[in-house]
Amino acid sequence: MRIKLKWKAPLSLVFLSLVMFSNVARAEDIPIVTGQQWVASSEAEKKAYLIGIANLLDIERAYAGATANKGDITQRFGKGMQGRTLDSVRQGLDDYYAANPTMIQHPVIETLWFQMVLPGLKQNQ
């Protein structure tokens, strides 16, 4: 099976992200992607980041298996993001950082959680 050239860069970024998280590291050694890196990234890089997050959540869900409950972060994340597409999430983050330039130093994962997941949980109850 041959991977199209346009997917090589995003897949490489996802692989790199997984390799970084697979090593045991101190919290201060793990780089956090902020809005500053987000706005400077290409569309493909942004999608790769979001795919990486989705893959990590899928791995966690699979690991938890039958022991998962509604309070698990993976369950809450999935319910809060219900109905969203990769492009709508990317566009939502782009719009948020454009409208809130003072929040540019905040981590993307934090922005995703507070601006999309939590409101989505309220909406999708």
Image (spheres, rainbow, N blue to C red):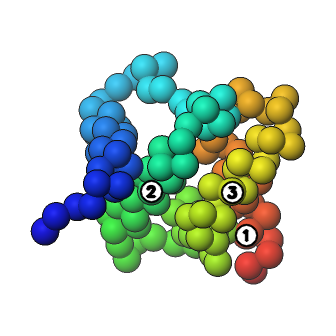
How far apart are labels 1 and 2 at the CA level? 20 Å
Q: Quadrant of the C terminus?
A: bottom right
Q: Which label was assigned to residue 51? A: 2
How far apart are labels 3 and 2 at the CA level? 14 Å
Q: Tell me the element at label 3.
A: helix
The x, y position of residue 64, in whole percent, is 37, 66
How far apart are labels 1 and 3 at the CA level? 19 Å
Q: Earlier in the sequence, mark 3 or mark 2?
A: 2
Q: Tell me the element at label 1.
A: helix
Give the amino acid type for the residue marked by disc 1 in the picture.
Leu
Extreme-top residue of the structure: 28
Give the amino acid type for the residue marked by disc 3 in the picture.
Gln
Residue at image position (83%, 32%) is 101
Q: Which label was assigned to residue 113? A: none
Q: Which label was assigned to residue 91? A: 3
Relative to the observer, which residue lies in front, 56 or 41? 41
Residue assigned mark 1: 121
**Camera-side mark, 1 or 2:** 2
